[in-house]
Image (cartoon, grey):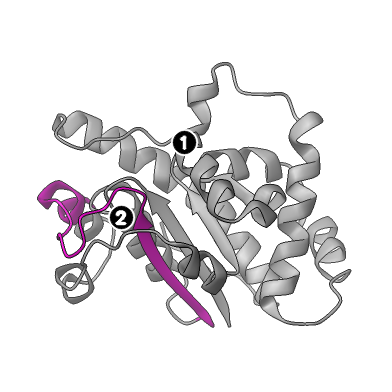
Amino acid sequence: MLNILVICTGNICRSPLAEKLLASRLMNSRVRVASAGTRARSGEPMTSEAVRLALQNGCEPEGLAGHEATLLDARQLLWADWTIAMDRSHRRQIVELQPGLMSRAFTLRELARLVDGVGDETLLDVAERSSDSSAGSRAAQMLTFAATRRGLVEPPASPEDDDVVDPYRRSRNTYERSAFQILSALPAVERLARLALREQAPERTI
């Protein structure tokens, strides 16, 4: 089993949307995906725009209706094998809560950028260096490898390019842009998760 935790601020827009979309992509895998917010008001539902975008991209209504915002704490970080931040401020707060995650905490878009162009064979070879065969340990090896590429891969034109834009209380177009940024980066997360689990990616029609 692989536990993935997605983190944003309020846990009502970006992180639950990314959580639901990723869970949908990994529906038949041994993966549990959860989300939390660094300043979440516990119990709040997803915004209507985030729900609309999730439904539009194949998520089931039942799972969306049951979402309740959760405030991030250190226990959740201990539960997670893998933490994914929506922007750099969230990554900093992850590391403040659990300094040991320094080399394994990334923003979603940063991680996708760092593993872009790295072949499956290379990543599998890295994963096999794990001291045990658990999916969590294999994922940790690949994330540590990704961290070593921070000084090798050309940085983004602007630091903000590693962030998913926050659409809260903003326009429909901003929600669409935020969702596009999430959707563009999620295939990289799915790929790493399946490699950690030793699974083949399914054929997709879209």
Q: Is residue 83 magenta?
A: no
**Amino acid at circle 1:** Ser
Where is residue 184? Give x, y as percent.
Answer: 46, 43
Residue range in magenta is 29-53
- Position of 8 with respect to 174 (left or right) is right
- Position of 122 with respect to 116 (left or right) is right
On-image quarter of the C terminus: bottom left
**Amino acid at circle 2:** Leu
Closer to the camera in the image, 144 or 191: 144
Q: Quadrant of residue 80?
A: bottom right
Closer to the camera in the image, 54 or 97: 97
* Res 175 label: none
Q: Earlier in the sequence, mark 2 or mark 1?
A: 2
| Callout 2 crowding tier (Cα within 10 Å): few <14, some 14–19, many ≥20 | many
Q: Quadrant of residue 177?
A: top left
- What residue sits right under mark 1 in the picture? 89
Question: Measuring 79% from the left and 30% from the top, which residue is drawn there?
Answer: 151
Judged from the image, the secondary structure of the residue bearing numbered disc 1 is helix
Question: Measuring 36% from the left and 49% from the top, which residue is drawn there?
Answer: 38
